[in-house]
Amino acid sequence: MNKKVAFYTLGCKLNYSETSTIGRLFNKAGFDTVDFTDTPDVYVINTCSVTDNADKKCKKVVQEALKISPKAYVTIVGCYAQLKPKEIAEIPGVDMVLGAAEKFQIVDYITDLTKNPKALVYNQPVSEANGFISSWSFGGGRTRTFLKVQDGCDYSCTFCTIPLARGNSRSDTIENVVNQAKHIAASDVKEIVLTGVNLGDFGIIDGKRENKFFDLVKALDEVEGIDRIRISSIEPNLLTDEIIEFVATSKRFVPHFHIPLQSGSDKILGSMRRRYKRELYTNRVAKIKELMPDCCIGVDVIVGFPGETREDFIDTYNFLNELNVSYLHVFTYSERENTLAAEMKGVVPGSTRAERSKMLHILSDKKRRAFYETQLGKSADVLFERDIKDGFMHGFTRNYVKVQVKYDPILVNELKSVYLNNISHNGDVEVTESEEILVH
């Protein structure tokens, strides 16, 4: 009987794509992938350094894993494993810690599943993680795939540990990405989500710029069999007019951009070492809405950064309130070791950070509802997913409006033309199909 392996992923879509790739490595080595609760022989926990309390979350997952399968061999990989290998090795029950340069050789390292009193640590300097390993994952019930095309970052934002955890910016080749997209298309997946650490910086291979992200966009638009391609996140200074103009008339790229802002205060943007001021961000949003009035625009924003006064926060709040965007991803600033921001003066009290976060979460809800209201009465194509909650299933329009219908197995992974009727009590949009009512 084959050995069993289970996975748990913390963090971003990029981590999910890499977990899937690691899973395929185990499958090739003769392991069967099972659910977390199915008493596996091996647990692989893929960690993140961006989310709060990374250490607590890692410990909690290890504890739960060993309750289910006490003799399981536990391996930790990912960004947190690169940054804090010694701390992770001290977590009771952890057997192995692999850094960024080692995680894709995990099967070679796991040669003996005997649990030892002390964890093994294989963790080279992040500079050794200089090659690009392509990854893709299925999510949303095989409705969409997260396709990694870029890794690492050459930016030096003062709050971020990603360059320390993932190394310099590097990319796949356009040829490889196109071939992967064709393979994904052949598996009946309808949507590809392009992912990377700094996606707009795509094109650096072996330390040299070979292409631009726009070159990749044009090449992928020609891949037959994929209905939708979504850009996961792109820096405002890398979102060029040519990209916006191309997406506006694209066959496959959808009208949805997620554009990190981080602060609406130029003072704070300077402290963060962001590569733009808010005027550029305003111009990007205006350009998108000029060409794609129904485009969905998401925003990343950080509250409580060192030196952020009440006036700075109000500046950010008012800027976002007046900006024609659709929703916010709000992050409460938390100190990270080995970052410049952690040493800055003007520390914002935790209670103030929480208060500001709550205000922006409320603003985000208002923004999303206002955007949804502009879409009511319109027809749209919805791609339905295999998620069921309280008898309902969900799907998304091209411009990222979330709709709900009564569960129907025939709809899974299907594109249906619907009318967007009204907003339900939970904030999703209720719809009717052209021929029959889906929501009663």
Image (tube, rainbow, N blue to C red):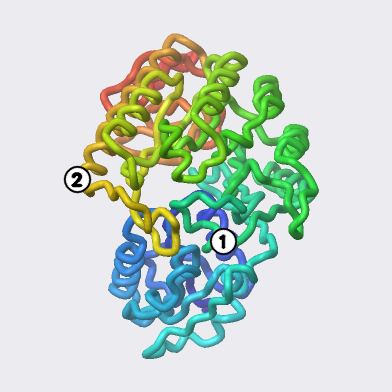
Q: Tell me whether circle 2 and circle 1 mark residues in contact (CB < 8 Å).
A: no
Residue nearest the observer in this picture, 167 or 398:
167
Q: Report x, y in % for residue 156.
A: 54, 52
Name the residue located 45 percent from the left edge and 71 percent from the top edge. Answer: 76
Judging from the image, what secondary structure is the residue with disc 2 in?
helix
Q: Is residue 426 above or below residue 267?
A: above
Give the residue pinned by disc 2.
351
Q: Pick whichever of labels 2 and 1 is earlier in the sequence.
A: 1
Q: Amino acid at mark 1?
A: Arg
Can the viewer see residue 44? Answer: no
**What residue occupies the far top of the structure in this picture?**
377
Name the residue located 61 percent from the left edge and 80 percent from the top edge. Answer: 108
Name the residue located 53 percent from the left edge and 69 percent from the top edge. Answer: 32
Q: Report x, y in % for residue 22.
A: 57, 65
Q: Is residue 75 above or below residue 428?
A: below
Q: How many marks?
A: 2
Report how far apart the C-alphas of labels 2 and 1 lie in the structure.
32 Å
Is 276 placed left or right of 306 in the picture?
right
Q: Amino acid at mark 2?
A: Ser
Residue nearest the observer in this picture, 416 or 47:
47
Residue 371 numbered tag: none
Q: Which-is-in-front pick, marks 2 and 1?
A: 2
Is 99 placed left or right of 291 in the picture?
left
Q: Report x, y in % for residue 212.
A: 74, 41
Give the residue pinned by disc 1.
166
